[in-house]
Image (cartoon, rainbow, N blue to C red):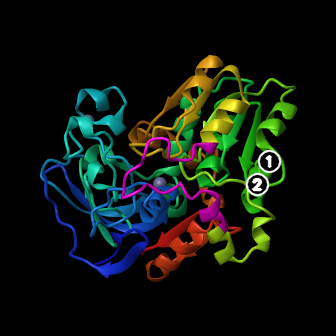
């Protein structure tokens, strides 16, 4: 089968690899009908999330059809349409039972202390071959797969594989309550769904910070208040918009790859110049020899979040900060009595509920899809997405 395979930092290829097989009685195999490229994939390709094993199939967002189930799998039969939860949980250990699927004791082959296991990730997460492929092996199928309601399309469902639940989880971490003013750092696809989730969880106002105009336009289209960090100081803007108090809650949907403000509007620059400026602006945004060095990494989104939140406010962090990153402004957070919660989404906890909300017509996640690509052009799609080009919010892969 065809699959997008990681060979090295900056080196991914569309390869022909062996079809996946049932390896454990709790496995299933699916034929992927829709996949997607995610910001997390870019971390793996850029090397900001180190430790990938060459030969690993990328991708952790997909919708598909079950083709085969292991002897212990109940509740699924070949032909069922399913969405795949990006993180893998066994469903029976004490962590899964408490809803912490991303901290499952048994899913990660590296042991219970290794943390989250997810598709298409670094060695420490499995590795488990990913979903940007024609077929995929799904470990712990009874919890990792969720049936797709009949009236939910593949395009809608693929955004419930990772993006929507992650954003929803971020809003939960931020402890959003009725009437809150919520600041979302980052207007990429997770930021868009974070703005939506904040509203659905009770926020009265949502402010969104980003530096790409088309992304801020998308935020404005859902009645969030856009702040362009290339045109104004975002912390000052938040204070001004909140009577000097700051936002009650913040969702950091950026993580370690924060861009510094660059000179001139992004859209006016050729892509190569934008690449160069980004690299020059944040040269330390790369781990050295595959390892983060203390004091080395940019924590701009986290800093802005801490400065812009109100005293005694709360911050939910869902943007990726990889293991080894230890440059968080703890002192400033302490001095403001902040609550900071962070982590990898416990997908299985939210996916069924969010699918039901989509099925009920409460929201149409597919409206955020801006690009489609055939697997053959996926490598180029990765490059363009990496440049944060205008108009690129979410790329789905039409595999079927
Ligand atoms: Zn993702
Ligand atoms: Zn478990």
Q: Main secondary structure of the magenta part?
A: loop
Instruction: Determine if residue 280 is in view.
Output: yes
- Quarter of the picture holding the C terminus: bottom left
- The percent coordinates of residue 307 (x first, y second) are 70, 31
- Quarter of the picture holding the N terminus: bottom left
According to the image, label 1 marks what residue?
226
According to the image, label 2 marks what residue?
216
Q: Which residues are magenta?
A: 277-300
Separation of disc 1 and disc 2 at Cα?
6 Å
- The percent coordinates of residue 284 (x first, y second) are 53, 54
Q: Which secondary structure, mark 2?
A: helix
Horizontal side of 86 relative to 327 (left or right) equals: left
Whether the magenta-drawn stretch holds residue 188 is answered as: no
Q: Are marks 1 and 2 in contact (CB under 8 Å)?
A: yes
Q: Which residue occupies 60% across, 38% down?
A: 302
Q: Residues within 10 Å of mark 1 (few under 14, many from 20)?
A: many
Horizontal side of 64 relative to 170 (left or right) equals: left
């Amino acid at each position: 089968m065809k699959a997008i395979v990681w060979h090295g930092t900056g080196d991914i290829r569309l390869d022909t690899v062996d079809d996946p097989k049932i390896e454990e009685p709790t496995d299933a195999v699916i034929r992927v009908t829709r996949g997607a490229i995610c910001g997390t994939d870019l971390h793996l390709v850029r090397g900001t999330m180190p430790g990938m094993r060459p030969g690993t199939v990328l991708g952790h967002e997909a919708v598909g059809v079950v083709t085969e189930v292991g002897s212990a799998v109940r509740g699924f039969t070949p032909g069922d349409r399913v969405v795949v939860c990006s993180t893998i949980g066994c469903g029976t250990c004490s962590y899964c039972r408490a809803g912490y699927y991303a901290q499952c004791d048994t899913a990660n082959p590296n042991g219970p202390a290794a943390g989250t296991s997810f598709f298409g990730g670094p060695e420490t997460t499995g590795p488990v071959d990913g979903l940007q492929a024609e077929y995929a092996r799904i470990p712990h199928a009874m919890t990792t797969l969720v049936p797709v309601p009949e009236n939910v399309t593949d395009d809608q469902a693929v955004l419930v594989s990772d993006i929507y639940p992650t954003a929803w989880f971020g809003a939960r971490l931020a402890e959003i309550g009725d009437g809150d003013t919520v600041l979302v750092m980052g207007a990429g696809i997770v930021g868009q769904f974070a703005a939506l989730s904040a509203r659905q969880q009770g926020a009265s106002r949502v402010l969104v910070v980003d530096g790409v105009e088309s992304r801020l336009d998308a935020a404005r289209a859902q009645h969030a208040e856009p702040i362009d960090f290339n045109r104004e100081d975002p912390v000052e803007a938040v204070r001004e918009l909140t009577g000097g108090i700051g936002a009650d809650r913040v969702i950091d949907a950026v993580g370690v790859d924060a861009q510094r403000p660059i000179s001139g509007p992004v859209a006016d620059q050729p892509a190569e110049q934008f690449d160069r400026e980004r690299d020059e602006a944040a040269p330390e945004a790369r781990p050295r020899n595959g390892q983060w060095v203390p004091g080395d990494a940019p924590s701009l989104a986290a800093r802005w979040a801490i400065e812009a939140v109100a005293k005694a406010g709360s911050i939910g962090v869902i943007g990726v900060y990889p293991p080894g990153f230890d440059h968080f402004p703890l002192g400033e957070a302490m001095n403001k009595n902040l609550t900071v919660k962070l982590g990898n989404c416990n997908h299985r906890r939210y996916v069924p509920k969010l699918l039901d909300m989509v099925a009920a017509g409460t929201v149409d996640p597919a409206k955020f899809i801006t690009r489609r690509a055939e697997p053959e052009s996926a490598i180029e799609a990765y490059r363009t997405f990496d440049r944060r080009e205008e108009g690129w919010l979410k790329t789905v892969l039409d595999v079927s």
